Image: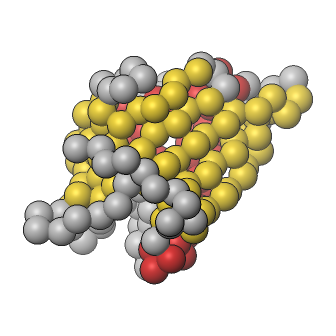
């Protein structure tokens, strides 16, 4: 399922950073828990409506595989999958990523997420996806930026005193 990554041949990358007002352990948990992923994983459509998560399978260990289906507000499903390469709580998460559609082949890319202490109760989340074909870079950049916006909003809700998520 997971082809060898040739990052030299496909050198396009996306880098996004956000500072969130939560400790690294909570930011890491929200990246690695299906119940939290369901609240923020996926972009927004042209009208600003959130995609939802229709399915989430995670074998959360180094070498384990993951597979997620996000659903557009119009009801179209988009499958993606990969393999966990590195899990270092609460500091780092590395996994491969590829779209999945019958009859099509998509390249695997590498996603690296670092959770850096930014103060007593803040974390800098540094996201990097590398190995993208040039034709896909901008779409991934906007999609992941929307995911990071949704992640930031979810973390603010989780931190709210009345939160029961």
The colour scheme used to paint the residues is secondary structure
Q: Quadrant of the N terminus?
A: top left
Judged left or right of residue 70, residue 151 is right
Identify which residue, 88 or 29, lies in the foreground: 88
Judged left or right of residue 28, residue 72 is left
Is residue 163 in sight in this rendering? no
**Residue at image location 39% in from the left, 20% down from the top:** 61
Identify which residue, 41 or 58, lies in the foreground: 58
- How far across and how far down the image is residue 138, in percent? 54, 76
Residue sitting at the far right? 119
Number of numbered markers: 0
Judged left or right of residue 71, residue 130 is right
- How far across and how far down the image is residue 128, in percent? 61, 52
Judged left or right of residue 81, residue 142 is right
**Residue at image location 29% in from the left, 64% down from the top:** 106
Where 29 falls versus 124 (above or below)? above
**Residue at image location 25% in from the left, 50% down from the top:** 69
**Residue at image location 76% in from the left, 33% down from the top:** 116
Is residue 74 in sight in this rendering? yes
- How far across and how far down the image is residue 31, in percent? 51, 35
- How far across and how far down the image is residue 153, in percent? 60, 48
């Amino acid at each position: 399922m997971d082809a060898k990554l040739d990052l030299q041949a496909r050198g396009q990358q996306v880098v996004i950073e956000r500072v969130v007002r939560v400790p690294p352990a909570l930011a890491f948990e929200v990246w690695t828990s299906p119940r939290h992923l369901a609240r923020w994983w996926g972009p927004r459509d042209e009208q600003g409506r959130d995609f939802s998560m229709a399915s989430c399978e995670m074998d959360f260990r180094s070498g384990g595989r993951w597979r997620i289906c996000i659903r557009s507000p119009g009801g179209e499903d988009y499958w993606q999958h990969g393999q966990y390469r590195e899990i270092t709580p609460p500091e780092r998460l590395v996994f491969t990523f590829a779209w999945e559609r019958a009859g099509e082949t998509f390249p695997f890319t590498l996603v690296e997420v670092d959770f850096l202490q930014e103060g007593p109760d803040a974390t800098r989340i540094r996201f990097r996806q590398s190995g993208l074909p040039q034709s896909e870079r901008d779409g991934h950049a906007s999609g992941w930026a929307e995911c990071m916006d949704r992640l930031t909003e979810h973390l603010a809700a989780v931190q709210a005193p009345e939160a029961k998520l």
